[in-house]
C-alpha cells in the first residue's frame, strides 16, 4: 500500500487541472479518501462550475488558473507545492475540435507543454521531486493499426483533438527522458459515468432515454451508430491514474476493458433499462452529426497495467449503462416534479 505521506512527512499534496470535469471530480474524491490535500485549477473569472465544486468537493483548495496562461500554472505550483500533478484539463470533445482546432491545439497540446515546464521549473527552484500524470487518450490510435491497441501500437490520430493528444503524449515521454522527470502517461479508453458531459454519446443516450420514458421527449437524433468503443466506468479509471503515480518508475499504460460495443448496442441496453425493446421508432440519424473523419472501432489491451499494478475494471458495460440511465431518470423526474418510476 502506497504511503499517503509526502517527502516532508506531511500528507501528500496533489494538484489537478480539469478538476471540474468528470475525471477531476472522481479523482479528487479518491485522493481525498486517501488523506491527500487536493488543489484544483479553476479557470475563468466567473466559472459556473465553481458552485458545483464548492458543493461536491468543499475540502478541495481552488486555485484560479488556465492552461493557456503559463504564469497562472507556475503560481498554482507555488501555492499547491504538490507531490503529484494530474493534468486532466483539456478541450475534450472530439467533434468540437474540428470547429475550434486552434483552441484545441493551444489547450490540449500547448497546455501540456506549459504544465510540464511549470513542474520542471518548480522542481528546480524547490528541490522537490514531483510526479506528473498526463491524460492521454485512445483517440490517438484513430485509424487503428493493430487490434487490440497496446502501448506500442502506432498512433494515427483522426481529429485535431487526437493530434493534440499525440503531442502531449510524446512531450510527456520526452520530459521523462530529457529531464529524468517522473512523468507518466495514461492512454485511457472511453470512460463514462453519471457525471459524463451531456455532449458525449453515452450521456446523450442515457439522458434522452430517461426523458423519452418519462414522456418529456419524443425522439433522439444521433450520428454514426455503427461506431464501436471500449467503454469503462470513470470511477475505475481514476484508480489507474493514481496507481500509475505510485510506481517507482514512470511509464505509459493503456487502461481499457478489452471489450468493444457499438452505439446500437448502447441503445439496446439503455432502452431495455426502461422496458423498451425496440428503440428504432425513437431514434433518428442526421448526417450533420457525422465527423469529418471517424474512429470506427477501439478496443484496448490493459495487460501491462494489470501486470504492473493489478488494475482491472470492476463495472461491466451493462451495469455502466444501467447506472447512467437510472441516474438520469432520477434527475429528470426531480426536474419534472414527479417521482422516479
Ligand atoms: P471533461 O471534458 O469532463 O473535463 C475537461 C476539464 O478541462 C474541465 O474541468 C474543463 O474546465 C478543463 N479545461 C478546459 N479548458 C481549460 C483551460 N483552458 N484551462 C484549464 N482547464 C481547462 O473531461 P474528462 O474529465 O472526461 O477527461 C479528463 C481528461 O482525460 C481530458 O484531458 C480528456 O481529454 C482525457 N481523456 C478522457 C477520456 C474519457 O473517456 N473521459 C478518455 C481519454 C482521455 P471547465 O469545466 O471550466 O470547462
Ligand atoms: P469520443 O466520444 O469521440 O470517443 O471521445 P463521444 O461519446 O463523443 O463519441 C463516441 C462515438 O459515438 C459516435 N456518435 C456520437 N457522438 C456524440 N458525441 N454525439 C452523437 O450524437 C453521436 N452519434 C454517434 C461518435 O461519432 C463516436 O464514434 C471521448 C472523449 O471523452 C475524448 O476526450 C476521449 O479522449 C475519448 O473519448 C477516448
Image: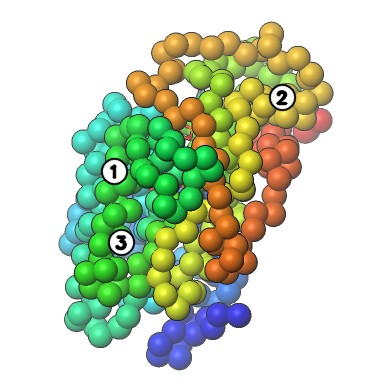
Dot 1: few (<14), some (14–19), or many (≥20) neighbours within 10 Å?
Answer: many
Kindly give the residue lying farthest to the front in the view shown.
Answer: 146
* Residue of label 3: 173
The nearer-to-camera label among 3 and 1 is 3
Nearest the viewer among 290 and 327 is: 290
Q: Which residue appears at 64% of the width and 58% of the height?
A: 312
Kindly give the residue lying farthest to the bottom in the view shown.
Answer: 9
Direction from residue 248 to residue 231 in the image, left or right: right
The nearer-to-camera label among 2 and 3 is 3
* Residue of label 2: 268
Q: Quadrant of residue 86?
A: bottom left
Q: Position of residue 113 (x, y in %)?
A: 23, 57
Q: Quadrant of residue 191?
A: top right
Secondary element at tag 1: helix
Confirm or deny contact between disc 1 and disc 2 (CB under 8 A).
Answer: no
The Cα–Cα distance between marks 2 and 3, rounded to whole angstroms, is 40 Å
Q: Quadrant of residue 120?
A: bottom left
Q: Position of residue 41 (x, y in %)?
A: 35, 59
Q: Which residue appears at 60% of the width and 26% of the height?
A: 263
Residue 246: mark: none
Secondary element at tag 2: helix
Direction from residue 124 to residue 163 in the image, left or right: right
* Residue of label 1: 164
Amino acid at each position: 500500500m502506497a504511503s499517503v505521506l509526502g517527502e516532508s512527512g506531511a500528507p501528500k499534496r496533489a494538484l489537478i487541472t480539469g478538476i471540474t470535469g468528470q475525471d477531476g471530480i472522481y479523482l479528487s474524491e479518491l485522493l481525498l479518501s486517501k488523506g491527500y490535500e487536493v488543489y484544483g485549477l479553476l479557470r475563468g473569472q466567473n466559472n459556473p462550475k465553481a458552485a458545483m465544486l464548492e458543493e461536491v468537493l468543499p475540502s478541495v483548495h481552488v486555485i484560479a488558473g488556465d492552461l493557456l496562461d503559463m504564469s497562472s500554472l507556475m503560481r498554482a505550483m507555488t501555492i499547491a507545492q504538490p507531490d503529484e500533478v494530474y493534468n486532466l484539463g483539456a478541450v475534450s470533445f472530439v467533434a468540437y475540435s474540428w470547429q475550434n482546432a486552434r483552441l484545441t491545439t493551444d489547450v490540449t497540446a500547448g497546455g501540456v507543454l506549459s504544465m510540464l515546464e511549470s513542474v520542471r521549473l518548480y522542481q528546480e527552484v524547490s528541490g522537490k521531486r514531483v510526479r506528473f500524470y498526463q491524460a492521454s487518450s485512445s483517440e490517438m490510435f484513430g485509424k487503428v493499426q493493430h487490434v487490440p491497441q497496446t502501448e506500442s501500437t502506432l498512433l494515427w490520430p483522426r481529429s485535431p483533438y487526437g493530434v493534440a493528444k499525440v503531442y502531449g503524449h510524446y512531450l510527456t515521454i520526452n520530459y521523462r527522458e530529457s529531464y529524468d522527470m517522473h512523468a507518466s502517461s495514461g492512454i485511457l479508453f472511453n470512460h463514462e459515468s453519471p457525471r459524463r458531459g451531456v455532449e458525449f454519446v453515452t450521456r446523450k443516450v442515457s439522458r434522452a432515454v430517461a426523458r423519452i420514458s418519462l414522456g418529456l421527449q419524443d425522439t433522439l437524433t444521433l450520428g454514426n451508430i455503427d461506431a464501436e468503443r471500449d467503454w469503462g466506468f470513470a470511477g475505475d479509471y481514476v484508480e489507474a491514474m493514481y496507481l500509475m503515480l505510485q510506481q517507482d518508475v514512470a511509464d505509459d499504460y493503456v487502461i481499457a476493458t478489452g471489450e468493444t460495443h457499438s452505439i446500437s448496442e448502447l441503445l439496446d441496453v439503455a432502452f431495455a433499462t426502461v422496458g423498451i425493446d425496440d428503440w428504432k421508432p425513437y431514434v433518428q440519424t442526421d448526417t450533420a452529426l457525422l465527423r469529418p473523419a471517424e474512429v470506427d472501432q477501439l478496443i484496448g489491451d490493459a495487460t501491462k497495467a494489470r501486470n504492473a499494478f493489478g488494475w482491472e475494471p470492476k463495472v461491466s458495460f451493462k451495469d455502466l449503462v444501467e447506472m447512467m440511465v437510472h441516474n438520469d431518470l432520477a434527475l429528470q423526474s426531480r426536474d419534472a416534479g414527479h417521482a422516479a418510476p
